[in-house]
Amino acid sequence: MASIDVTVRGAGIFGLSVAWACVARGARVRLVDPFGAGSGASGGIVGALSPHVPENWNDKKAFQRDSLLMAEEFWSRVETAGGTSAGYGRLGRLQPVSDARTLALAHDRAVGAQQLWLGQADWRVVPAVGGWAPMSPTGLLIHDTLSAHLHPRRAVSALVAALMARGVSVAADGADAGAVVWATGWRGFDALSQGRARPLGVGVKGQAVLLRHAAAGQPQLFVDGLHVIPHLDGTVAVGSTSEREFDAADTVDAQCDALLARAVAALPVLAGAEVVERWAGVRPRARSRAPMLGHWPGRPGHFVANGGFKIGFGMAPKVAEVMADLVLEGRDAVPEGFRVEASF
């Protein structure tokens, strides 16, 4: 058997994407996850790929912008390789304008977007019209065209299919060989934190609801912290909660029901929609709040790709590129604030 160039531990969105980027460059990859692909938060139902506001610019926002601009080509190549749809669509996002102050900020951010988004997307104010428009006190909405969405489970399946087409499957176990990339999610923070006074990251539980409602081709909505995502398969996802303290990682409770009530209040057209699924999972949040990428300090040949809290799918194309650059070619383009040391 040919020797392995890279072992990737963890088959969530970061692990799968890094494995795919390495395979696409001709590397021989071993992909290991004892629980299977998308067994954690990456097997969720929401899938909002959205930018931070175009102001107070920093490396994290620039990295995210670049990744969102890369996403269409990234997912197209994955789908072509494996013959499986990720449910991706760059269809924008709508947010209500609540008052005069929000409207003034929206106009300022529209100017910022013209420069910071490189002329490839807009942030603009539009009238709230149509059945898919969220309730807005001013009758106005913010519409950005950089946002996209996908179905997380379908995206995971698309990456698995693309990797299998190149001869790489997800194994339940396997020895380390070659460079080792640790993309082990919130449970992986324990190993990273050994010898440190404080943990480098924590798990934050989220709950979400999937509804039967046909709204394919519509933009996603963001209303008072709530994401409403119209998937291409005739479902709408609503999420999510953020729970630092929890007894069980995968159980739902009354907080999940409250999401549905909030969604109907924001978008009355969802009233009476069939509930297809209630979901819960735990997302990895690094102490720095940015993705944790790069060399694992003190462990030569080992690398980390973790901490994609809420933005993992949106960051994945760029994370995959940067990690493949580092692991395969030694080119280190990891932003300073993303380095593992930034969470020490």
Image (spheres, rainbow, N blue to C red):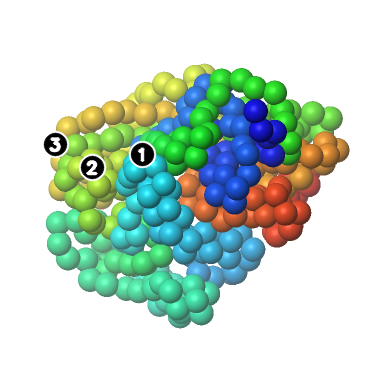
Disc number lying in front (3 or 1): 1
- Give whichever of discs 1 and 2 has the lower sequence position: 1
Asked which secondary structure carries label 3, the reply is: loop
The quadrant of the image that shows the C terminus is top right
**Residue flagged by tag 3: what amino acid is it?**
Gly
How far across and down, in percent of the image, does residue 42 sit? 47, 36
- Toward the viewer: 49 or 207? 49
Give the CA separation, mark 1 to mark 2. Answer: 10 Å
Where residue 309 is drawn, which disc sits there?
none
Q: CA distance from mark 2 to mark 3?
A: 19 Å
Q: Nearer the viewer, residue 64 or 197?
A: 64
**x, y percentage for residue 71?**
45, 57
The disc labelled 2 sits on which kind of residue?
Asp
Mark 3 vs 1, N-terminal side: 1
- Label drawn at residue 233: 2
Label 3, on which residue? 272
| Marks 1 & 2, CB-CB < 8 Å contact | yes
Q: CA distance from mark 3 to mark 1?
A: 26 Å
Q: In the rendering, at what x and y percent does residue 133 appear?
A: 21, 59
**Residue at 72% across / 54% down in the picture?**
329
